[in-house]
Image (spheres, rainbow, N blue to C red):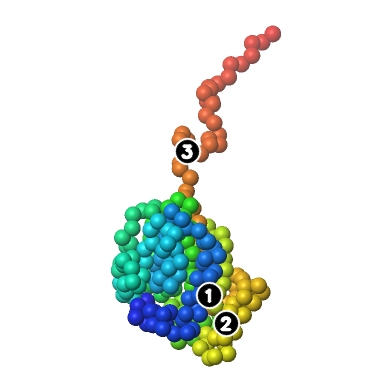
């Protein structure tokens, strides 16, 4: 089930560990999408910690928060861009989103199939999405003191298989949160070092969270004419007895 928005806000904005997690994941996302000028960017779940850098670039930014989680005003000190919605019915027109981010939106949903269907619907042709989920083999998924300790953790293979079944094409995969999920002084002071080291050693499967970037695959339009080649063409004279040759 979805976490409460108050708990998510408290973790990411009021704890040192949450701010470190926000920074580590946001840096990886920024590396994937360094420029979103003129594009529509949307986030679902609790993606607002990652969307702020795009506010001054994107043509439109919107934060979708599921009803089971609750909603909060965002961004602070500016006109509100967050919307409370049903997790499988978003108030967006079909094919209007260029960039989509899901964090705490897929692994905590009781309807992941429908959520992915809605992701596909709102994405523009060749639109891109990044799915951020807890890593089944990571330390963060094993500790319920952070939001990544709730819901269904994934392996990269599991996540990519689920995305492919909805006509998403995985293109790049990253990981983040290589530092342990601990707020102790030593780990907090060395957090940046562990993030840099983890990216160099294994930027695909290690870490507390997995990040998979996908592209929306649009089926080719049906070809006009016969749907498939005729394997055995009809011969006009088939079935007509051939004339016997005249005797010499």
Judging depth in this view, the residue of 211 and 80 nearest the camera is 80
Residue 7 visible in image: yes
| In this view, 20 is above or below 159 | below
Q: Secondary structure at mark 3?
A: loop
Which mark is nearer the camera, 2 or 3?
A: 2
Find the distance from the CA under tag 2 to the CA under tag 3: 55 Å
- How far is disc 3 from disc 1 in space, using C-alphas? 47 Å
Label 3 neighbourhood size at 10 Å, few (<14), some (14-19), many (20+)? few
**Badge 3 is on which residue?**
223
Q: Residue at x 50, y 71 (%)?
A: 26
Instruction: Give the residue at the far right of this rendering.
Output: 248
Residue at left 51%, top 39%?
Answer: 228
Which residue was labeled with disc 1? 24
In primary-sequence order, the first of circles 2 and 3 is: 2
Question: Residue 160, can we see it?
Answer: no
Task: Look at the image and tell me in which quarter the C terminus lies.
Answer: top right
Disc on res. 191? 2
CA gap, disc 1 and disc 2: 9 Å
Residues marked 1 and 2 touching at CB (< 8 Å): yes
Asked if 4 appears above or below 123 in the picture, the reply is below
Tag 2 secondary structure: helix
Position of residue 96 relative to residue 32, above or below, is above
Q: State the quadrant of the N terminus.
A: bottom left
């Amino acid at each position: 089930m979805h976490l409460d928005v108050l708990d998510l806000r408290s973790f990411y904005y009021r704890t040192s560990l949450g701010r470190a997690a926000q920074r580590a994941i946001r840096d990886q996302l920024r590396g994937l999408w360094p420029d979103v000028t003129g594009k529509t960017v949307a986030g679902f779940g609790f993606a607002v910690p990652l969307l702020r850098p795009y506010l001054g670039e994107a043509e439109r930014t919107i934060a979708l928060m599921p009803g089971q989680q609750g909603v909060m005003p965002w961004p602070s000190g500016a006109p509100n861009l967050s919307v409370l919605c049903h997790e499988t019915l978003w108030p967006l027109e079909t094919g209007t989103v260029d960039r989509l981010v899901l964090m705490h939106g897929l692994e905590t949903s009781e309807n992941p199939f429908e959520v992915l269907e809605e992701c596909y619907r709102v994405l523009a042709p060749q639109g891109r999405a990044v799915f951020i989920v807890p890593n089944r083999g990571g330390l963060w998924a094993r500790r319920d003191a952070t939001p990544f300790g709730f819901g269904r953790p994934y392996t990269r293979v599991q996540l990519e298989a689920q995305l492919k079944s909805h006509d998403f094409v995985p293109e790049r995969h990253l990981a983040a949160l290589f530092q342990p999920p601990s707020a102790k002084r030593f780990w907090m002071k060395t957090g940046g070092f562990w993030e840099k080291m983890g990216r160099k050693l294994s930027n695909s499967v290690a870490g507390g969270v997995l990040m998979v970037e996908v592209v929306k695959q649009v089926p080719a339009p049906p070809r006009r004419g016969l749907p498939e080649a005729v394997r055995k063409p009809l011969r006009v004279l088939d079935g007509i007895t051939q004339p016997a040759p005249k005797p010499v």
